[in-house]
């Protein structure tokens, strides 16, 4: 995919209210998925949502599974019950995805999730990467998996009709452009890194400042 097409795809996806078809098309191109890899199952709701999250989560839907050869990543759409939950309950959202990844589906551990968090009657939404760190605890007689999840392991872009997609473009265009190599979890984590964007921002304006100074 050429750069202009990639930028346009991000604009159409992230500068509008959430649209599932647009989001699925974006994910297909981001992860180089075939159409048959897209799922169409009924969303989880009601009794399938843990009691601790029922006041916040309306539905959970998996639209695709992806592996980079080493890590397993699920692509999810999570619909929230309250509009205010999008901005004020980020810890809850992170912990809910941690619950999902930490064996909620038949006890199988997943490494990460790409998630669209969607609020009711809102033109804005969040696109997040939640990454799990599992450590094997050998201090006991039986080897146990010890979960580690910190706020630094949850990255997000706030997107939608009232948001600019400039940051998302800076981060995600290179992955969209590369049709020959499927992205790794490390690639995705780096693309969500605000530190990377900040460095690029200051480097851009440092060069601009030097050019003006020379003139």
Image (cartoon, helix red, strand yellow):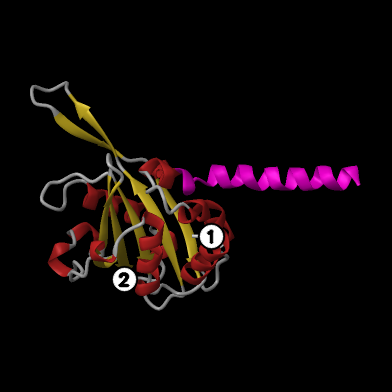
- Residue 118 shown left or right of residue 213 in the figure: left
In the foreground, 112 or 1: 1
Relative side of 212 to 24, left or right: right
Residue at horizontal 15%, vertical 46%? 108
Is residue 138 placed above or below 9 in the rendered structure?
above
Give the labeled residue for mark 2: 81
Q: Quadrant of residue 3?
A: bottom right
Q: Position of residue 86 (x, y in %)?
A: 41, 64
Choose top left, top right, bottom left or bottom right for residue 126. Answer: bottom left
How packed mark 1 is, by other alpha carbons closer than 10 Å (few <14, some 14-19, many 20 or more), is few
Categorize mark 2 by other alpha carbons within 10 Å: few (<14), some (14-19), many (20+).
some
| Label 1 – label 2 distance at C-alpha | 38 Å
- Measured as percent of width and height from the top left, residue 32 is found at 36, 56
Q: Residue at x 41, y 68 (%)?
A: 84
Per the rendered image, the range of residues in magenta is 190-215
Residue sitting nearer the eye, 165 or 130: 165
In depth, the one of 199 and 118 nearer the eye is 199
Percent x, y for residue 2? 53, 60
Q: Quadrant of residue 165?
A: bottom right
């Amino acid at each position: 995919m050429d750069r202009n097409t990639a930028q346009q795809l991000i604009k159409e996806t992230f500068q509008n209210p959430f649209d599932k078809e647009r989001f699925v098309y974006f994910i297909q191109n981001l992860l180089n998925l075939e159409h048959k890899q897209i799922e169409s199952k009924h969303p989880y709701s009601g009794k399938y949502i843990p009691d601790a999250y029922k006041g916040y989560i309306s539905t959970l839907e998996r639209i695709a599974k992806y592996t980079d050869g080493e890590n397993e990543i699920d692509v999810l759409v999570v619909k929230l019950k309250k509009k205010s939950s999008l901005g004020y309950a980020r810890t809850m959202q992170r912990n809910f995805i941690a619950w999902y990844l930490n064996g909620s589906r038949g006890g199988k551990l997943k490494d990460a999730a790409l998630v669209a968090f969607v609020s009711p009657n809102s033109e804005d939404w969040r696109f997040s990467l939640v990454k799990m760190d599992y450590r094997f605890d050998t201090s006991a007689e039986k080897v146990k998996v010890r979960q580690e999840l910190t706020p630094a392991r949850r990255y997000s872009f706030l997107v939608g009709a009232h948001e600019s997609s400039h940051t998302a473009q800076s981060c995600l265009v290179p992955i969209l452009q590369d049709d020959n190599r499927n992205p790794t979890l490390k690639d995705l984590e780096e693309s969500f890194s605000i530190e990377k964007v900040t460095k690029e921002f200051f480097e851009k304006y440092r060069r601009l400042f030097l050019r003006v100074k020379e003139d």
